[in-house]
């Protein structure tokens, strides 16, 4: 069975390599903060005052503290799993450079709103 390229791997790897602080929001609303130490297919190790392993199925959103420049290699956004033939090699483009840019003012405003709601409870 051939492997389909993952968007999360280059994103998480860039955060890990550059030691960028992240906020991880869980599906139950809990917010975790720290630096990604390691990750695999099913979990992320997040370091703050202690290391914690977070299962990916429990994660809703990963928000970096600053913009991250990503290079996606072997990723084709038009790749369809429905048309995938496991007997053939994946048809990927080589080195498609993509930048992850986001308005961090909006993220910080959402963070402030989240903190205010948590304080009221």
Image (cartoon, rainbow, N blue to C red):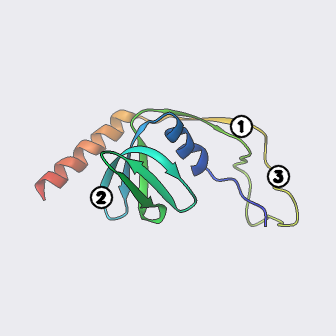
Mark sitting on residue 35: none
In this rendering, position of residue 92 left or right of residue 50: right
Q: Nearer the viewer, residue 87 or 117?
A: 87
Q: Which residue is mark 2?
A: 30
Q: Residues within 10 Å of mark 3 (few under 14, many from 20)?
A: some
Q: Nearer the viewer, residue 7 or 47?
A: 47
Q: Which residue is mark 3?
A: 91
Which quadrant holds the N terminus? Answer: bottom right
Q: Which residue is mark 1?
A: 96
Answer with mark 2 or mark 1, whichever residue precedes in sequence: 2
- Residue that extends furthest to the left in the rendered view of this protein: 120
Answer with mark 2 or mark 3, whichever residue precedes in sequence: 2
Q: CA distance from mark 2 to mark 3?
A: 39 Å
Q: CA distance from mark 1 to mark 3?
A: 13 Å
- Contact (Cβ within 8 Å) of mark 1 with mark 3: no
Residue 91 placement (x, y as % from top left): 82, 52
Q: Residues within 10 Å of mark 2 (few under 14, many from 20)?
A: few
Residue 121 placement (x, y as % from top left): 13, 59
Question: Residue shown at 53%/37% (left/top)?
Answer: 17
Question: Residue shown at 31%/38% (left/top)?
Answer: 108
Q: Nearer the viewer, mark 2 or mark 1?
A: 2
Q: CA distance from mark 2 to mark 1?
A: 34 Å
């Amino acid at each position: 069975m051939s492997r389909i390229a993952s968007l999360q791997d280059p994103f998480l790897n860039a955060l890990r390599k550059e030691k960028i602080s992240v906020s991880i929001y869980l599906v139950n609303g809990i917010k975790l903060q720290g630096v990604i130490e390691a990750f695999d297919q099913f979990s992320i190790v997040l370091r703050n005052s202690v290391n914690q392993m977070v299962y990916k199925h429990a994660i809703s959103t990963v928000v970096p503290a600053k913009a991250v420049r990503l290079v996606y290699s072997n990723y084709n956004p038009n790749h369809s799993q429905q048309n995938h033939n496991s007997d053939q090699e994946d048809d990927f483009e080589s080195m498609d450079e993509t930048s992850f840019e986001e308005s961090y003012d909006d993220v910080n405003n959402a963070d402030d709103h989240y903190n205010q709601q948590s304080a009221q409870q």
